[in-house]
Image: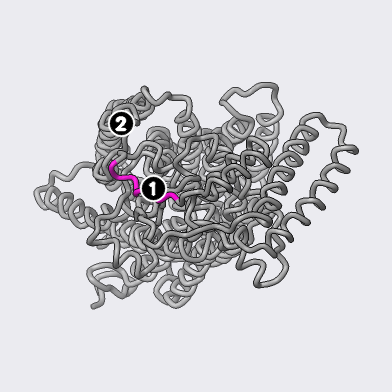
Amino acid sequence: MKNTENKNEIQMMFGHPKGLWYMFGTEMWERFGYYLMLGIFSLYMLDGWNNGGMGFTSQLKSDIYGTYLGLVYLTPFIGGLLADRLLGYRRSIVIGGLMMAAGYFMLAMHTIPSFYAALFLIILGNGFFKPNISTLVGNLYSEDSLKNKKDSGFNIFYMGINIGAFICNFVAAFMRINYGWGYAFAAAGVGMLVGVIVFMIGNRHIKTYDVVKPLQKGDMSTMKILGMTVLPMFVFGIIGYIIPGNLLGTDTNDAFIIGCLPVILFFIYLAFKSEAKESRAIKALLAVFACVILFFAIFHQNGDALTTWAEDYTDRGMSSSITKPADQIGMAQKLENSAVVSNGEEVFASNIDFFNTTQNLMPKKSKEDLQKVKECTMKLETFDKSYKYFENLNKKDVPTLVVVPVAQELSQAIRADTFANDTMVLNALYATPKSQLPNVIQEKAELKKLAALATKSIQDLTKDLAKEKDEKVKKEITAQISATESSMRVYEFLATNAAFSDVKKDVPNLKLYSTELYQSINPFWVVVLTPVMVGVWGFFRRRKREPSTPTKIAIGLIITALSALVMVGAVYATNDLTIKASSLWLLASYGVITIGELCLSPMGLSLVSKLSPPRITALMMGGYFLAISVGNKMSGMLSSLWEGFGDDSKQNFFLLNFGLVMAAAVLLFLMLRWLNKVMRENNVL
């Protein structure tokens, strides 16, 4: 089908320009990679180093999460400007896509330098990709005959985003459970490369909309804009980082927010220096940007605070009808009870220290060595996840504890020949069926090898301790020596005493939905509800009563606030977190916030496309992403408050979220008359 009313013939498909569907596919695969990485990002940072994660503290995790999310939406300001002035949209999209793919592959390497280098590439790549594909979608509807389809076009485009976001978490769960974190991140890189290929295939349907607009008289040069924004942004960021104390909780919070000030001031300057009509449009956009910041501060807690809620406070148990097929495709997370897990915090901590030391000592040279390390890691992860999950699980749901009887003679030997800490470890190990233990501690030859490696490690650490001057580092080395000495004694005891025993029956286990899968609830609702919302707006449009785009955004803010109240109910349902909440609470909360999201997020993109002066559309799209950036950083800042609320007051965390978004909604409703007036002036209402 072709639209022949336009001056330039536009190839159409399903009532929309054909280019939309190629960009739909591009964005679907780009978001597949982005949300796959984001869905496991917090879990990866919290997981122990020996489990393949980064081993960060909860505070550091939230700080990095918020800073990453903030920066990933801050760079679109630069990417939008360079596309508008120099590179063009298509070239910027390809450059950005390839940079992000490289970043995802680097995350698979599991080193500290590659971790931060990967985040840098993803942040920079998103800056080139994100604003420019959205701008191109808006450009598809530049003809008068298509302008009334722009909102629905962005809704379709937005559904593509969420199809990718829905699928990716199943891939993430499968890859992580069966192969590890690195393979999950590599899958994100493959998805991004597929997106770039789809975009290049659709190039002929898009290229006519990639037009670099000429500067007008009085416009700043590109270098001057960068000099007034990016350079001061770095300078202000450094000042924010080094100023004494913490104005906003951490040095990185101060650096980020203070660093954003020059860019914010630039947009304010732009609003007042433009000619009168453009000035009013830019001011209207900036007013909306200020309000949507708080939406994203709440919305993007799905990857942080709400992921923590899903991991620690949600009943993720699978029904028996799902367990078998989930097992067959490697999608079930298995937990087991054991003497290591069930005998209190002190016994558990001693055993985990022992296994961590063992992993650190194990050789990692040959393929066989790495396979043994992997097997030990999987057993350790089962102990760790089981202990944490069983803490507030209803006792009747905890798998039956299977204990191996310890012979009296062996028990006496343990008490007589070992230190108190070693005794706790050995008693727990001997009471645990051998099928639940790593093979490396069951073979005498391996145990003797580990004892020798422990002796060598103690000698090296002792030399390091003698040279070290820093008291804090000396304490850390002393603790390492103590842990290694304890492990060495355990290896020697195991190598010279009775072998582990097993039980004839299978050890009962509990199968869980992986936490990553909860990240698919929101995109699931988006895919389901997008046609409904498009239909609702279409219903009102046919009756000439469709709300304006700013009104839709204001409605979205109110609905978002209500989603926080759903989580208040979830907290009360846990009886001060002594039991786990039903998954239905998260399902409901995500459902409510998705309706708010559909009223707001695609409408924000549409509003920028409608109101922006044509020569700076991508720049203003970058401004919209700057607002998202600040909101995302605030998301991490808010999530970092989670631990500060006690078990008897977690509901106050969600009440705080409710109050913040409701305040933004009220402010936007007070500005609606003025915003609608500006839209009428620009013939887009």
What residue sits right under mark 2 in the picture? 571
- Could you tell me residue 553's position as x and y percent? 29, 40
Q: Is residue 271 magenta?
A: no
Q: What residue lies at 52% left-to-right and 40% top-to-bottom? A: 66
Q: How is the image coloured?
A: one colour
Q: Is residue 341 left or right of residue 662?
A: right
Does residue 445 lie above or below 227 as drawn?
below
Q: Is residue 164 left or right of residue 461?
A: left
Q: CA distance from mark 1 to mark 2?
A: 29 Å
Image quarter hosting the N terminus: bottom left
- Could you tell me residue 593's position as x and y percent? 29, 42
Question: Magenta part of the protein: which range?
Answer: 396-403
Instruction: Name the residue type under label 1.
Output: Leu
Q: How many marks?
A: 2
In the image, 178 versus 28, the foreground residue is 178
In the image, 477 versus 204, the foreground residue is 477
View extreme (left): residue: 543
Q: Is residue 402 magenta?
A: yes
Instruction: Name the residue type under label 2.
Output: Val
* Residue 359 seen anywhere in this rendered image of the structure: yes
Image quarter hosting the C terminus: top left
- Could you tell me residue 3's position as x and y percent? 25, 73
10 Å neighbourhood of mark 2: few (<14), some, or many (≥20)? Answer: many
Res 27 quadrant in image: bottom left
* Residue 86 seen anywhere in this rendered image of the structure: no
Q: Is residue 461 left or right of residue 431?
A: right
What residue sits right under mark 1 in the picture? 401
